[in-house]
């Protein structure tokens, strides 16, 4: 039978049109809806093999013609899908000779294998009730559709693999940068501690009491800095491995914010903080961990937006409590915003400042453990705002 080049061009164009989309189900439906102009079918089902159990499950199904109003009662080709998987080839089935009072009792089926990366991934089944029988051209069209669906899955799999590879490569770069950064961050306080300790122990020099006190104060400060750095590393590891146990109880987040704000004002008398709170209900959370989030946000603001006034706003909706922590610093370039909560990530422009890229990662993990959400918005030279949503009634 001669090949209908117009029809093949049509299917090829459809195949090209579905390559760019990220939603395979939408692309699949678009393909099938357009193909139905050339290839009539009533039901279509896509069966996929589970990679772990090797069970055959329906991934997507549509009723498009006769029998649409009684989808649960009509054939979806489960049997032929199993045969296609077993034989790994196209199979056509026709009903026994009639007569049939109801067309739904006379399904004509064609099942086709779905391949991706040369591996059998599933079966595509078309069902046509009451005929006509599938012609050679119909079979050719169905095979083209199955080939297009296979290519779609292969394309989606390649995109996903590329995304995963990019993510792994980025994490490897971040870890390499982290190793270099942490080496510097550890050596700096150790260098101070060793240097001033060695000076105090010198027998050929006499230090007056005031100088000794100054040296000891520096040693204490650098020891605290080293302790904080090590604790952040351990905390990051615990959160990453999901081994942190949170102690949930009813608490007032506005009271925690006021407490943390007062503590930072004590240590930074010039710090200007404006609190803009609505009346907010209590939430279920871990007060120590939420204080830790606020500590990190304050520390970041003092480090990266020095001298900037801070505004902390809080409001409540029907289901969630919203907190906004804003500074008026230099801001974060837009291309870096999606990554600031990643482990070890540091904005390149801020690499001259000390830091490990763990603070915001720790914040995110704590908020996620509260079934909440944290994100950042920023305008260059106008500041950054960190938003936190926490559920008022979290899931049990």
Image (tube, rainbow, N blue to C red):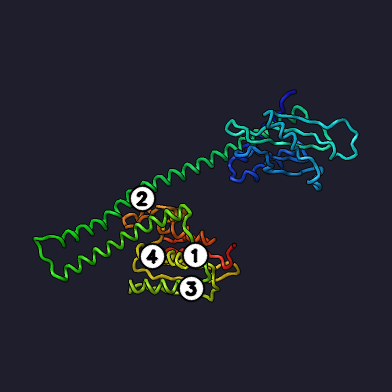
Q: Which residue is rendered at x = 10% and y = 62% of the image?
A: 205
Nearer to the camera, 76 or 229: 229
- Tell me the residue that label 3 is attached to: 254
> Disc 3 or 2, which lies upstream in sequence?
2
- Tell me the residue that label 1 is attached to: 247
* Left or right: 80 in relation to 246: right
Residue furthest bottom as drawn: 279
Q: Are marks 1 and 4 in contact (CB under 8 Å)?
A: no
CA–CA distance between discs 3 and 1?
18 Å
CA–CA distance between discs 2 and 4?
21 Å
Q: Quadrant of the C terminus?
A: bottom right
Q: Quadrant of residue 45?
A: top right
- Tell me the residue that label 2 is attached to: 178
> Disc 3 or 1, which lies upstream in sequence?
1
> Disc 2 or 1, which lies upstream in sequence?
2
> Disc 3 vs disc 1: which is toward the camera?
1
CA–CA distance between discs 4 and 3?
19 Å
Query: What secondary structure is found at the residue carrying circle 4?
Result: helix
Query: What secondary structure is found at the residue carrying circle 3?
Result: helix
Position of residue 196 measured from the top left corner of the image (x, y, whole percent): 19, 61
> Disc 1 or 4, which lies upstream in sequence?
1
Nearer to the camera, 380 or 393: 393
Q: Are marks 3 and 2 in contact (CB under 8 Å)?
A: no
- Is residue 188 visible to us here? yes
């Amino acid at each position: 039978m001669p090949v209908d080049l117009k029809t093949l061009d049509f299917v090829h164009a459809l195949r090209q049109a579905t390559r760019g989309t990220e939603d395979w189900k939408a692309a699949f439906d678009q393909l099938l809806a357009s193909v139905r102009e050339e290839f009539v079918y009533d039901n279509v089902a896509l069966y996929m093999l589970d990679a772990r159990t090797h069970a055959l499950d329906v991934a997507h199904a549509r009723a498009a013609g006769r029998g649409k109003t009684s989808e649960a009662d009509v054939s979806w080709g489960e049997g032929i899908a199993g045969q296609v998987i077993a034989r790994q080839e196209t199979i056509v089935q026709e009903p026994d000779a009639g007569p049939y009072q109801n067309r739904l009792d006379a399904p004509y089926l064609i099942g086709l294998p779905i391949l991706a990366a040369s591996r059998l991934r599933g079966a595509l089944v078309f069902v046509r009730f009451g005929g006509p029988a599938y012609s050679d051209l119909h079979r050719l069209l169905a095979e083209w559709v199955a080939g297009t669906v296979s290519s779609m899955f292969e394309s989606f799999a390649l995109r996903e693999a590329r995304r995963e590879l990019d993510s792994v490569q980025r994490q490897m770069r971040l870890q390499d940068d982290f190793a270099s950064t942490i080496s510097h961050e550890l050596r700096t306080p150790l260098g101070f501690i060793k240097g001033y300790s060695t000076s105090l122990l010198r027998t050929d020099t006499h230090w007056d009491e005031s100088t000794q006190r100054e040296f000891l104060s520096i040693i204490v400060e650098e020891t605290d800095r080293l302790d904080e750095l090590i604790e952040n590393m351990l905390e990051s590891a615990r959160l990453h491995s999901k081994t942190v146990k949170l102690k949930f109880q009813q608490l007032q987040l506005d009271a925690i914010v006021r407490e943390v704000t007062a503590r930072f004002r004590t240590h930074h008398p010039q710090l200007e903080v404006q609190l803009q709170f609505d009346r907010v209900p209590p939430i279920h959370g871990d007060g120590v961990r939420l204080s830790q989030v606020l500590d990190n946000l304050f520390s970041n603001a003092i480090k990266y937006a020095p001298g900037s006034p801070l505004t902390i706003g809080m409001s409540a909706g029907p289901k969630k409590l919203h907190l906004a922590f804003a500074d008026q610093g230099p801001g974060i370039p837009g291309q870096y915003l999606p990554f600031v909560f990643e482990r070890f990530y540091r904005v390149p422009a801020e690499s001259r400042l000390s830091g490990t890229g763990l603070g915001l990662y720790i914040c995110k993990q704590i908020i996620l453990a509260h079934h909440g959400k944290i994100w950042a918005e920023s305008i260059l030279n106008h500041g950054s705002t960190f938003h936190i949503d926490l559920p008022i009634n979290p899931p049990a």
